[in-house]
Amino acid sequence: MALGIYIQVPFCQTKCTYCNFHTGVVSRDRYEPYANAVCSEIEAAGNGRLKSDAVGESGGGSAVKLIVDTIYFGGGTPSLLAPGALARILDALHANFRMVDEGEREVTLEADPETITAEKAAAWHEAGFNRISLGAQSFDDRELMAAGRMHRRADIYTAVETLRRAEIANISMDLIAGLPHQTWESWESSVDELLALRPEHVSIYMLEIDEGSRLGKESLSGGWRYSAGAIPSDDAMAEFYESACARLAEAGYEHYEISNWALPGFRSRHNLKYWRREPYFGFGAGAHSFDVQMRWANVHDSARYVACIEQGTSTREQVEALTTEQALDEELFLGLRQLEGIDFTHIERAYGSNGQRARIEAVRERINALREQGLVEFDGNRLRLAPDRLTVSNEVFEALLE
């Protein structure tokens, strides 16, 4: 089992109205110290070994040493960092972790269209980035403006052309179903334009309405700021998503996870680690790590993170040793996010002997109830969400794990 590395870059040019992530707009003067801090954290990990040091006082901890085959720079907007800073972070990873051969590595950089230039793209390719995740979100300028995005439709086309000229052969593109002012016509047009560009990978997310974003908070309070009154209905969002499912399938994309599609051979190998509960280490403010037995996370505030690194104190904000019960829950809801589902025979074999037999029987009963409602189905021993009920997946997870 190979290791994934995640690098968190929590900086943006502006905060999108729908964003509920721990990111912020800060002075560019803070970019370089932050990149240096990330390099220092990587170096402190030491030759591919990393401990959840927040439990160090009790002499505990957990460490693994595995070869790295995926690296993912997420955020925020990692493409805001200078190419030299990004290259230094990659160099630090190479110096401290064992890597698979270059041709076997997946190295992803999230980038906003308006931040991409020919010089940057060439530098990224030279540094070793071979996959760019492009935050398009929509091809409709009115929707982009209402969401607080900095780019416009024309910038997406320019960005893709620039990346292709830089020999980036693996581009992922995001769309959001449910943005304010989105209509059936504008959604279908966005999908049309995405398919015309034919990225190797596609992610489609349904707009989240919660207290964590300005738009969500305004919508829940019945307000109108941020175009909250122009959010499509839940039924409309579901229709947008289902239409995209059908159209992407017709265009040759494999639907392999609730929100993700890929042309053959281009599934996100890094993100698959999350859904398959494989080990990954995170560096940077707010980055999470998982070594199969434990999860831990860094402090979210970037200034505090840099201060911890400079002072030589722990960056850990939380550490959790997973119980068998928690591991079983994760196997179920993460596994069911994948369209191929989960091997329930494996679940019974792995957890039946760990004191979870009664709980597995209870899960079996819930599964039978969900099957009767047409929400889940078995294909041999594999349990999966019913293909036509993906839009209510959260409700299924809640019912299964109650």
Image: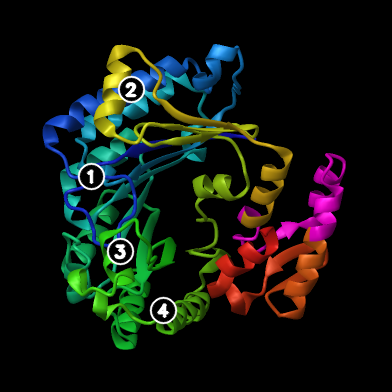
Mark 1 touching mark 3, by CB under 8 A? no
What amino acid does circle 4 point to? Met
Mark 1 touching mark 4, by CB under 8 A? no
Q: Is residue 339 visible?
A: no
Q: CA distance from mark 2 to mark 3?
A: 36 Å
The image's mark for residue 24 is 1
Lateral position of residue 376 relative to residue 97, left or right: right
Q: Earlier in the sequence, mark 1 or mark 2?
A: 1
Q: CA distance from mark 4 to mark 2?
A: 41 Å
Residue 167 on image: x %, y %: 31, 49
In this view, the mark in front (3 or 4): 3
- Secondary element type, mark 2: helix
In this view, the mark in front (2 or 3): 3
Instruction: State the residue position of label 4.
Output: 237
* Disc 3 crowd, CA 10 A, few/some/many (<14, 14-19, 20+): some
Lateral position of residue 65 relative to residue 38, left or right: right
243 relative to 295, above or below: below
Q: Which quadrant of the view contains residue 299?
A: top left
Identify the residue shown where x is 29% and y is 70%. Answer: 221
In this view, the mark in front (1 or 3): 3
Q: CA distance from mark 3 to mark 4?
A: 19 Å
- Secondary element type, mark 1: loop
Identify the colour scheme used: rainbow
Q: Which residues are magenta?
A: 334-362
Q: Quadrant of the C terminus?
A: bottom right
- Secondary element type, mark 4: helix
The image's mark for residue 39 is 2
Q: Is residue 248 visible?
A: yes
Mark 2 touching mark 3, by CB under 8 A? no
Instruction: State the residue position of label 3.
Output: 217
Q: Earlier in the sequence, mark 1 or mark 3?
A: 1
Q: Earlier in the sequence, mark 1 or mark 4?
A: 1
